[in-house]
Image (spheres, coloured by chain):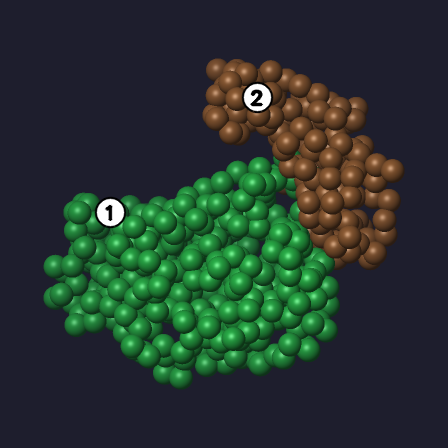
Chain colours: A green, B brown
Amino acid sequence: MRKVAVVGVGQTKFSGAQEKTGVELFAESAMDALSEASLKPKDIQALFLGNCLGDFTEGQGMVQAFAADNIGAFGIPANKYDGACASASMAIRDAFWWVASGFYDVVLAGGTERAATMGTSLATRTFAMFSDSRYEYPCGITFPGVFAMLAHLYSAKYGIPLEKLKEQMAVTSVQSHRYGMLNPRAHFHKEITIEKALGSPMVSQPLQLYDCCPFSDGAAAVVLTSEEKAKKLTNQPVYIIGIGQASAGPLANQQEYLPRIRAREISSKQAYEMAGLTPQDIDVCELHDCFSIASLIAAESLGFFDFGQAGEAWEKGEAAIGGKVAINPSGGLKAKGHPIGATGAGQVYEIVRQLRGECGERQVEGAKIGMTDTLGGDGGTLCNLILQRG
Amino acid sequence: MEYKLTFKEYNEALKKNKLLGLKCNSCAAITVPPKMVCRKCASPDMDIVELSGNGKIETFTTVYVAAEGREGEVPYIIVLVALDEGPWIMGNLIDIAPSKATMELIGRRVKMGHKVFCGDKYSAGDGARPLFSFET
């Protein structure tokens, strides 16, 4: 197996509804990623693209073929990945293997989505399609509903009074909004306070508006090459040194693990073992904070904090830049935004730039090892990547 | 291999207030909703059983923001219930105003009825779900 490097990354600004098409958004991020590595579209041997709702957002299926053609990567194989919000991470993981195996030297991966364009009503309906459609959707389950139930379960299981837990959850949102202010490509540039979060409209009890990430439009792209090729293209390669992916069935069937997400524990263990690292080695992590409570749940299963302790860790600044592990310096899904099929590639974009030391005011000083964590559905797909500065 | 208990059969039974599951002949675990194999040991050797529908609430939420087509239903309570036979199942809860749902619901004993979601343009037909109410 060959070492695989990220030699270029690109990301559009994540935003509310906009007029650029999914293909146009991806094309912009792809050309930026290629240009960083001084590569041309004709150098790309395959495209692996995350996109889960192109059919609902703009009536476009099979977007990957149009995307490859659009950027001038004529005739190459192009695959689409649907793992709900983890789609782009799956695409990057598979791109890794194709390069690691020696079959391809240069692969473009990423994702594109126009989740904001759908509007809240259709987006809520289509996101619910990533829960069990036959056995759970009839109950009216929504994505906030899933994590709302996990929040109550978390409170009960770890003996944290709900009022206390809600304050801890608000702290994660406040931190993400603070970092979003420092990220010019973030969806939101607005500071919030704990009081504002706790006073916002109820979405699905106990989750209020500021516990929830937005629906966003956006795209991101990553160019992967072999180590040999990378050394010729850049003096700042970032290597992918650990990968993991796992799946799970309906939410109710995950019963004995909840509020922990079993697929995350399988996936992250694979990634840590492959990298030969432990959670203590991670300097910076972009994790899947689709909801405030999801930040706590993810940080615990990734091994950064003890179960039931993550909220306190956030309050003490242990999850902040300069803390034990810098979590979501980009602003996370909460403030950077969540164009679902592109989100994993957006996480890799941030980690790569952190490891290259390019993040300005939100730079994690001396970051050498970074991790991404992307969750699809109610734990139905989970993907983790560990990256190291070359 | 033929599917032992399909969604169609499960759904028709639930519309008559009968909750069907599958009991594994290898490890005795109950699988609900039905699958091709046991959710614990992956054996396909299972028999259809009728479950009590009784259990206790493990967690809950009151939904205020609806999906397209279900605006008329909010607010409503969703619960995860641990059935007496072991499996957890998702359903809705009546007997309490949605705005009055608190952490005190967790641990409450419930019994099962049903309600049918009539379906929408994406759902390939209708689907019944458990509708729980307090046991006493």
- For the view shown, which residue lies furthest in the bottom direction? A361
Residue depicted at 83% across the width and 56% down the height: B100
Q: What residue is shown at x 54% (from left), y 44% (from top)?
A: A257
Image quarter for residue A162?
bottom right
Q: Do callouts 1 and 2 point to residues on the same chain?
A: no
Q: Is residue B123 above or below residue A127?
A: above
Which residue carries the number 2 mark? B28
What residue is rendered at 66% in x and 67% in y? A164
State the count of labels: 2
Which residue is at the front of the view, A206 or A16? A206
Residue B135: percent from the left, percent from the top? 84, 36
Seen in the image, is A147 located left or right of residue B91?
A: left
Instruction: Give residue A234's quadrant in the image.
Output: bottom left
Image x and y of residue B117, in percent: 74, 38
User: Secondary structure beneath disc 2?
Assistant: loop
**Residue occupied by mark 1:** A98
Is A71 or A191 nearer to us in this picture? A191
- Residue found at x 29% / y 77%: A366
Expressed as whole percent of the image width and height from the top left, the position of residue B65 reads: 72, 57
Q: Is residue A354 above or below residue A302?
A: below
- Near mark 2 (Cα within 10 A), the count class, few <14, some 14-19 or many ≥20, is few
Which-is-in-front pick, marks 1 and 2? 2
Q: Give, as a three-letter code, the residue at label 1.
A: Trp
Q: Which mark is residue A55?
A: none
Subunit of label 1: A
* Amino acid bearing label 2: Ala
Structural distance between the alpha carbons of marks 1 and 2: 42 Å
Are circles 1 and 2 on residues that touch, CB within 8 Å? no
Q: Position of residue B67 (x, y in %)?
A: 69, 51
* Residue B37 relative to residue A326: left or right: right
Q: Tell me the quarter of the picture where residue A371 sits.
A: bottom left
Question: Which chain is home to disc 2?
Answer: B
